[in-house]
Amino acid sequence: MSIGQFDIIILVMQLTRLKALRKEKGYTQIKMQTLTGIDQSDYSKIENGVRYMTFEQCKRLALALDTSMDYLAGLTDEKKSYPRGK
């Protein structure tokens, strides 16, 4: 499967959002490892576009950064997380 121009735009948007949110919170990649359980080297690869995040990793990142998976995926421009269920 080849990556199309649209896929590349979405990937760049995701990476920019992930890094920007992390920096907004004042978190280091090591802090992200602590919050999510995602190894720092794996997190770095995700943030730099070397590796895709899994569904579970996306979920953990959204929780740690108080945002939605939709925002991380570039499906919405609303940073705010959805209300959490009980």
Image (tube, rainbow, N blue to C red):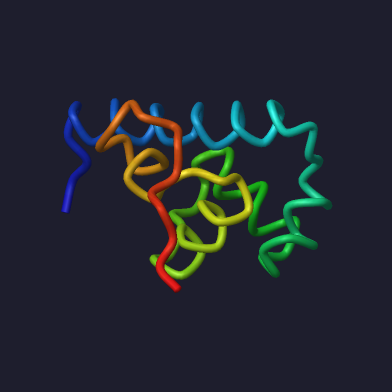
Q: Nearer the viewer, residue 47 or 72?
A: 72
Position of 77 with respect to 86 (left or right) is left
Q: Is residue 36 above or below residue 11?
A: below
Q: Position of residue 19 (x, y in %)?
A: 61, 32
Q: Is residue 43 above or below residue 24?
A: below
Identify which residue is drawn at 56% across, 46% down.
66
Q: Residue furthest bottom?
A: 86
Position of 5 with respect to 8 (left or right) is left
Q: Position of residue 31 (x, y in %)?
A: 81, 51
Q: Nearer the viewer, residue 37 or 44?
A: 37
Q: Is residue 80 above or below residue 84?
A: above
Identify which residue is drawn at 81% across, 41% down.
28
Q: Position of residue 63 (x, y in %)?
A: 55, 56
Position of 75 with respect to 13 (left or right) is left
Q: Quadrant of residue 7?
A: top left
Q: Position of residue 26 (x, y in %)?
A: 79, 32
- Please identify the quadrant where the C terminus is shown: bottom left
How many numbered badges does the structure rendering display? 0
Q: Is residue 7 above or below residue 63?
A: above
- Please identify the quadrant where the N terminus is shown: bottom left
Identify which residue is drawn at 41% across, 53% down.
83
Q: Quadrant of residue 27?
A: top right
Identify which residue is drawn at 52% across, 46% down.
50
